[in-house]
Image (cartoon, grey):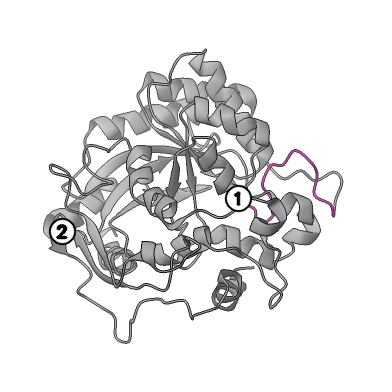
Amino acid sequence: RDELLAEPIVQVLRGFARGGCTSIAEILGSPGLAISRPWLLCAIDNREPLPVRVHYFLPIFGNAPGGWEEGMRNAAKIRDEKHESPRVHFGGVKIWIDGTMATFTAWVKEPFLTNPSDRGLHFIDTADLNRVVQMAEDLSLRLKIHANGDAAVEAALDAFEAVAGGQPLKSRHCLEHVAMIAVEDLDRMARLGLVASVQPVAKAATPMGSAPQKLGRARLNKAFNYRGMSDSGITLAFGTDWPVFPFQSVLLNLWASTRECGCARCGICCYAERNNAPPLLSCEALEAFTVGPAKALQREEDMGQLTVGKWADLVVFSCDPFAQTPTGEVGNVSILRTFIGGDRVDSKQRKGDKGMTLPPGTPMCCWVLDKASRIF
């Protein structure tokens, strides 16, 4: 029964508020499971304002009754029915091209080193992918396309190029995760105006398992190329990937994107040194957590910056994150307050909840290894 879900949903959203999130992009389902009941979120919000804004995306699966076409038409119908409330907003639809880096089901161009016939999985063929992108454009639906491997990213770019035909796309679409992307595809992605919706904690966590053995150090060192994306003009939109990674904290992902991941202590390779690509500066990372998501949702008029006329959604840090370190990474700061529309939303703290701080001198890889190794 829907009412039994209300309190657990609110508790999860309070966790995001405590972690410094003012908005989340929520996928109402996962591969093979659709829980498309946005009216439940609206009912909760109308009863008592939610502690974060929720932008919901509807999952579309080709093996569902009616296939891709029926799924896209149903998403447009739900959008047009306006299942929205003050803090619940329709975001778009999500499809999956491939699997994950953690399970080595990402669709990659070159086979995994442990099996020369294994290039991961892909769940949609070229014709269907082109049809989904075309329908998204025709129906004015924003697409969030799950694409981890470089082959999956290439397939997505091919589809967008085929549909665009050299003209600007009508909607602003996202590629989700983009763990691997060929250098030649960076400019293509930028020209298409696609947003890279990425989760920096994955950069720190992926090498903890068997990724070095299955991908090889050379390929792993080129993964999660946020510097290359940023320098190519691709908009970065940072997120948490919760619950895949059990952290709802903005700070963890800010740290992961601005610190070199790797040290002799835990033996994890250092992307920045070996790939000659420095991590993002704190100002770049903060933009990716504020302006970037606003662009991804095409809500720049409402959110992303503190300017007159926009929502008064803000987070109060314990100190200036720009001034903490001479090398540009986010320093040891904590989150004091979170506000939505000018209202404080982090006040209901759990007993003993003191937030998250990174011990001085601790490399990000060691901290995440200690906290998240059970995932792998």
Q: Measured from the top left, where is residue 14 in percent x and y?
A: 28, 67
In the picture of the structure, the residue carrying the numbered disc 2 is 49
Q: Is residue 103 magenta?
A: yes
Q: Secondary structure at mark 1?
A: loop
- Tell me which residue sits at (37%, 65%) in the image: 323
Which quadrant is home to the N terminus?
A: bottom left
Looking at the image, which is closer to me, 48 or 367? 367
Q: Is residue 94 above or below residue 342?
A: above
In the picture of the structure, the residue carrying the numbered disc 1 is 224
Stretch in magenta? 100-114
Q: Is residue 167 above or below residue 323?
A: above
Q: Is residue 175 above or below residue 265?
A: above
Q: Measured from the top left, where is residue 175 in percent x and y?
A: 51, 39
Residue 123 shows in the view = no
| CA neighbours of label 2 inside 10 A, class few (<14), some (14 to 19), many (20+) | some
- Tell me which residue sits at (55%, 41%) in the image: 229
Residue type marked 2: Pro
Residue 169 marker: none
Which picture quadrant has residue 75? top left
How many numbered tags mark residues here? 2
Mark toward the viewer: 2 or 1: 1
Looking at the image, which is closer to me, 344 or 65? 344
Whichever of labels 2 and 1 marks the residue nearer the N terminus, that label is: 2
Which picture quadrant has residue 344? bottom left
Q: Measured from the top left, where is residue 227 in percent x and y?
A: 56, 47
